[in-house]
Amino acid sequence: MLGHRAVNLEDYLDILKRRWWLMAVPAVVLPIVAIAVTFFIPAQYVSQTLVLIDQQKVPDDFVKPIVTEDLDSRLASMREQILSRSSIQPIIDKYNLYGAQHLSMDDRIDLARKSIDIKPIHSEIANSNGLPGFFISFMASDAHTAQQVCAEITSLFTGANLRSRADAAEGTTAFLKEQLDGAKRTLDDQDAKLRDFEQRNFGKLPSDESNNVSLMGTLNTQLEAVTQSIQTMEQNKSVMEAMLAQQSQPTSAASVVQNPQVQQQELDDLLKQEADLSAHYQPDYPDVKAVHRKIADLRKEMAQTVSAPAPAAPGASVPNRGDSATVQQLRAQLRGLDLAIQSKHKQQDELEKQIGAYQARLQSTPQVEQEFKQLTRDLQTSQAFYDSLNNKMNQSQMATDLEHRQQGEQFRVMDESNLPDSPTYPKRSIFALGGLAAGVALGLLIVALLEYKDTALRTERDVWAFTQLPTLAVIAWSGEVGEMKLSKRDRLKRLFSRKTPKKVVVDAPA
């Protein structure tokens, strides 16, 4: 009747007194059955090995490591490589794993993958880099097989680590070598462009500007000196021509007329020279003073010539009369002056051309400087990139040598794969506890079902819950009355409910 009303603690205790054997029997039987089942389950042995991670022997300040990937990621990547079919199938064939189960190769590979366990060991030290190591375990039905397969898988991990680091170092070195070759070609091209540009613009480069200014100043000084020399020579020539005219034969009237004309021409030349010098220099400049003095002297000579008697015309000279030595000397000197003046004029033209060339260089210097800066900047950028790649290449080569010498980070087997002395599965203690828990649960379920279907009225609350009527009387229990008339089932119930309350409710006869 308990399924039709609320149950309190007293009811639970009453149920426990009456039904304890229904819970005790499964709680005892099921653990025994579970332990017995373990004898029919194939035993599984687990072999385990400890792999520690040795850091690089050479300090990082001297040789930068090539492989900087997080160890967790590398370990996961190596796990996937080792658990691949190409790595697992040779081990299955070698040790005939799961051969007695008559499974396909795919199923055997899946079972082998599930039997492999890799457990990283995380460092408990704060701010530590990477992992100190990891465990590798393998589960098999035979202890020796588990040990051998675990050792095989461990060797795969250590070998994969060495190969991956060596491949990474060699791949990095090869990549940097290609990049360095490309950077060298670019640097050579930039260097060739700059060299061709310097050859095409020789003398126009920014570094030549100060030299060009200095040279142009020197050429201007030389040009002024040549110009003054020409002027002096022309003045001397005029004087010599006048002297030659005076030393000529005086029989000709034309010579009398010619001498003042020569002096006048020389005076005009001096006046022009004076005007040109006055436009460029101050009155106290030495050349200006010299011209003033020459003009004054020439004017005095012209005045004396006008006051002197007119000489005879050269045409009236005596026939077949030879020139005097003085005239011949003057004529030779005039010819020498003419040649010297011609040479100075050529020198003057050459200097003017050179000055014009340097002026053109100076005028084109800003444009050339802009192009030169662009080429220089490109060359510096290429040089910096080449130097950077060269340094990285050297570092990569040292790291590659370090890996080949096995002085880099390595997986060191600390504990070899052990030979298990007892099976890991099944654990009889765990099966016993599971059987006990299942027996108790089964007993509680049986008791609950029986109590739910039981409609016997044992207390006044049962009567009220069933009839909703108050109890008229309660008759004390007497074990002897009518006991022989009870059925076998009722006698069993009475036997197991001897310790029920001494009072029961008796239904009135109809």
Image: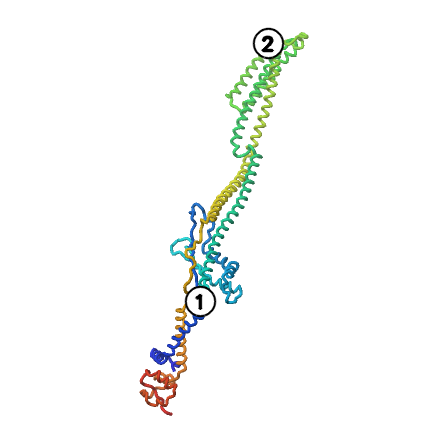
Where residue 21 appears, x then y in whole percent? Answer: 37, 79
Where residue 127 appears, x then y in whole percent? Answer: 39, 53
Q: Is residue 510 above or below residue 432?
A: below
Outermost right residue: 319
Tag count in the figure? 2
Q: Residues within 10 Å of mark 1 (few under 14, many from 20)?
A: some
Q: Quadrant of the C terminus?
A: bottom left
Which residue is nearer to you in this view: 272 or 488? 488
Outermost front residue: 144
Where residue 93 appears, x then y in whole percent? Answer: 52, 61
Q: Is residue 52 left or right of residue 271?
A: left
Q: Which residue is mark 2?
A: 308
Outermost bottom residue: 510
- On the question of residue 427 being in view, the answer is yes
The residue type indicated by label 2 comes to Ala
Where residue 474 appears, x then y in whole percent? Answer: 32, 87
The residue type indicated by label 1 comes to Ala
Q: Is residue 29 left or right of residue 271?
A: left
* Res 43 label: 1
Q: Nearer the viewer, mark 2 or mark 1?
A: 1
